[in-house]
Image (tube, rainbow, N blue to C red):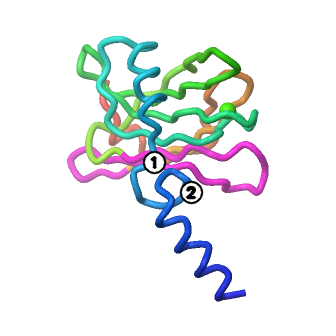
Amino acid sequence: MRLLLFATAAVCTFLVGGCASTSAPAADATLVHAFEEAVPGTTVISARSGDIDADGTQDLAVVYRTAEGTFRTRALLSHEGSATVTNEFKAPVEAQAVQLRDIDDKQPVEVIVRGSKNGAVGYAVYRVEGDQLVDVFDSGMANCCGR
Ligand SMILES: [Ca+2]
């Protein structure tokens, strides 16, 4: 069992984008481009691609800087031949990181956003419900998010 787990971890490391829980860059460039087209004037800070609405297609969870200089979290949900963006949440202003992880052993995977502001760390767990991003849990986000 231990050997199997090790082998799985090794495969994940070599397949960039194949495993959502690794620290390797795992954002699909096409989806990042689609997000930038859908939300003009933004700069993508951290993004992860994965099937976050459990419909069998790759989506994108994004922390981005708006044209006004604020930081937000949003998701791009891709469907057959089209894509939609979800609602947004305030995001940390420094050291932002997005992860996808199945926390509760139920589809879909959760989106975890972490970051800080002046050393104050905060994080939030979001989940896609319908075509919206829902805040499942957050801690310290008021201290690390901007406007
Ligand atoms: Ca999907």
Specify the amino acid type for callout 2: Cys
Neighbourhood count class around disc 1 (C-alpha, 10 Å): few under 14, some 14–19, many 20 upward: many
Q: Quadrant of ligand 1?
A: top right
Q: Position of residue 101 (x, y in %)?
A: 60, 53
Picture disc at residue 26 = 1
Q: Residue at x 46, y 29 (%)?
A: 30
Bounds of the magenta span? 97-121
**Alpha carbon of mark 2 to alpha carbon of mark 1: how far?**
8 Å
Q: Position of residue 45 (x, y in %)?
A: 32, 36
Query: Where's the N terminus, which quadrant?
Result: bottom right
Taking 76 as reference, is 37 left or right?
left
Picture disc at residue 94 = none
Does the CB distance between marks 2 and 1 fall below 8 Å? yes
Neighbourhood count class around disc 2 (C-alpha, 10 Å): few under 14, some 14–19, many 20 upward: many
Q: Residue at x 72, y 29 (%)?
A: 129
What residue does disc 2 label? 19
Q: Position of residue 74 (x, y in %)?
A: 49, 27
- Front in this rendered view, residue 140 or 59: 59
Total numbered labels placed on residues in the image: 2
Residue placed farthest to the bottom in the image? Answer: 2
